[in-house]
Amino acid sequence: MSWFESFILGLVQGLTEFLPISSSAHLRLTAAFAGWHDPGAAFTAITQIGTEAAVLIYFRKDIARIVSAWCKSLVDKSMRGDHDAQMGWLVIVGSIPIGVLGVTFKDQIEGPFRDLRLIATTLIVMGIVLGIADRLAARDEAGGKHRAVRERKTLRELGVRDGLIFGVCQAMALIPGVSRSGATISGGLLMGYTREAAARYSFLLAIPAVLASGVFELKDASEGGHVSWGPTIFATIIAFVVGYAVIAWFMRFITTKSFMPFVIYRVLLGIALFILVGTDTLSPHAGESAG
């Protein structure tokens, strides 16, 4: 991997990680369109450490409060009813599905799941799901002539059942094209949560999953020696800087705007991808042979 490739891929990772359009799909597509080798699941997992570092800094006050309350609740029973302490447990519970499925389907994630036809399908299908969820949320918030405004849930109403459902949604993002934020936010909106609550829990839930995945891939890559460390670290730094700017913008955007621009983008990209593959302009396995 060249330094130019690592710069572009790091930029793509930072721009797409927090938006509901799938960073893993865009890394795969960027390489395919440019005629580069598929950066692979290991590169994706390692560069995601950079974007998660952006989450840690952006939500540092929330994270410090949650970790502190959770640790205190281990020895002080009176703290177990505290919302922040409960959030600590809910993040752990919500991380179980992706941990189990990530280990179980590791070979598929690094191989068959990276087929461009599958990516096109997930882009379209999950785009439609996000669109439906967003429309339901907008209807609740706006009300109507014969329909009262419906109060949506906040994170204070999050329980174990909903936490696990969020976790299952996050696990779906193991398939490129689904999008971690897109799947979890869609799940949250369909369960009746506000856009801000769904996005905030989505980002908090991603921290242990992404960091664990990155460390796991770092270990494998170090032993296998198949990662270009200089360019990969450079891409990770780029992803961190760009990712921080994107998450700050996105959290402001969702308080007043609809997700429909992302829905339209996903569907159009998926259709374009099907056309390119169907006309043999692009191979569904472009770049995989050397990836």
Image (cartoon, grey):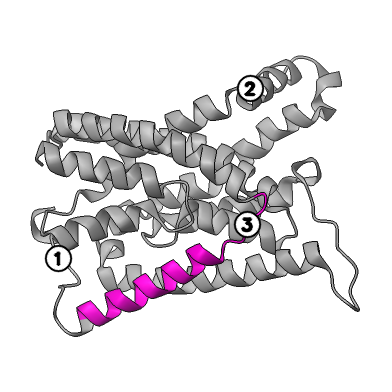
Q: Are marks 2 and 3 in contact (CB under 8 Å)?
A: no
Height in image: 230 above or below 172? Answer: above
Which numbered marker is on residue 234?
A: none
Residue at numbered disc 1: 286
Q: Main secondary structure of the magenta part?
A: helix
> Callout 1: helix, strand or loop?
loop
Residue at numbered disc 2: 61
Image check: 156 left or right of 7?
right
Distance between the Cα atoms at labels 1 and 3?
36 Å
Residue located at (42% from left, 33% from top): 211
> Callout 3: helix, strand or loop?
loop
Residue located at (86% from left, 20% from top): 78
Which numbered marker is on residue 257?
A: 3
Magenta residues?
255-277
Residue located at (49% from left, 48% from top): 98
Residue located at (47% from left, 39% from top): 209
